[in-house]
Image (cartoon, rainbow, N blue to C red):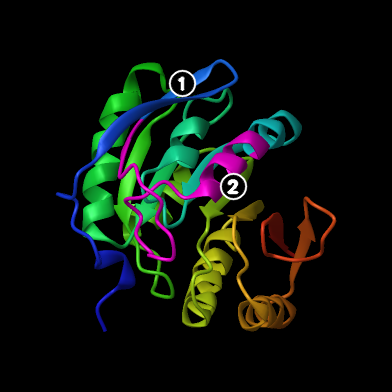
Amino acid sequence: MEAIGFMFGSNRGRTSKIFHYGEHAIVLNFIDDDPGHVQSGLYLWPAADTLCHYILEFFRTYSVDLVIELGAGCGLVGLLTSKLPGNNGVILTDYDPGSIEVLCENVDANLCDAVCPIYVEQLEWGERLTNFLMEKLLTLGSHQILVAGSDLLYCVSIVRPLFCTVVDILKSRKGSFILSTSFDVGDDIEKAVFSICEKNLIRYRFVNETNKLSSNICIFELV
């Protein structure tokens, strides 16, 4: 089956903007339009901005020295972390070739003030981690790893492969998966996520006190 993220090619009209988070500025190329219900990483999804604000606080609390962004799309979240002190590396991942192309452009536009290397890697959820990822998990940093994702829960069928990949990454060393969602994911997706967490001994907590994945930030960690 053709990946949903392939619906638009990277040649669709894009714009370039600068986003500011505290003292940090991120130059970003993306499709400047409301994505609606279309799943394409070439848009800037609302949850990415929300997650950026939260990650500034997270980095002040935890010793994070490696960040992997899943379904990175334009790469806003990962690019912000590349500018935060203490980080030893950022790996932006996506499966869509169009998103990979845009990610490479955005990395080039933000290298000048990055404090660490930034890598781009194609990754399919649910498959074995690439040799490149495995190598970086072993060699970049020695403290906590942060896996980040924004508006990833767009259908029930991706829940299992997504969390299989998250578990494979977090088994390598201590860390957290922070998932930001800006829309109502629906009961079926929530049930699927919580079921997988129970089976894989994944604990979770919500940043907002709604106890819902919808329009919230949730932090997942292996027990």
Q: Is residue 139 magenta?
A: no
**86 up-or-down from 65: above or below:** above
> Disc 1 marks which amino acid?
Ala
**Dividing the image into 4 quarters, which one contains the C terminus?**
bottom right
Relative horizontal placement of residue 30, taking residue 63 as reference (left or right): left
Where residue 122 appears, x then y in whole percent?
30, 58
Where residue 183 appears, x then y in whole percent?
59, 61
Q: Are marks 1 and 2 in contact (CB under 8 Å)?
A: no
Give the secondary structure at mark 1: strand
> Disc 2 marks which amino acid?
Leu
Point out which mark residue 146 bears. Answer: 2
Mark-to-mark CA distance, 1 and 2: 21 Å
Q: Sequence order check: which comes first, mark 1 or mark 2?
A: 1
- 55 and 186: which is toward the camera: 186
Q: Residues within 10 Å of mark 1 (few under 14, many from 20)?
A: some
Look at 85% across and 55% down and name the residue there. Answer: 209
Give the secondary structure at mark 2: strand
**Dividing the image into 4 quarters, which one contains the N terminus?**
bottom left
Residue span colored magenta: 28-54
Where residue 34 appears, x then y in whole percent?
41, 51
- 1 and 133: which is toward the camera: 1
Mark whose residue sits in front, 1 or 2:
1
- 172 and 181: which is toward the camera: 181
Residue at the disc numbered 1: 25
Relative horizontal placement of residue 56, taking residue 92 as reference (left or right): right
Q: Residues within 10 Å of mark 2 (few under 14, many from 20)?
A: many
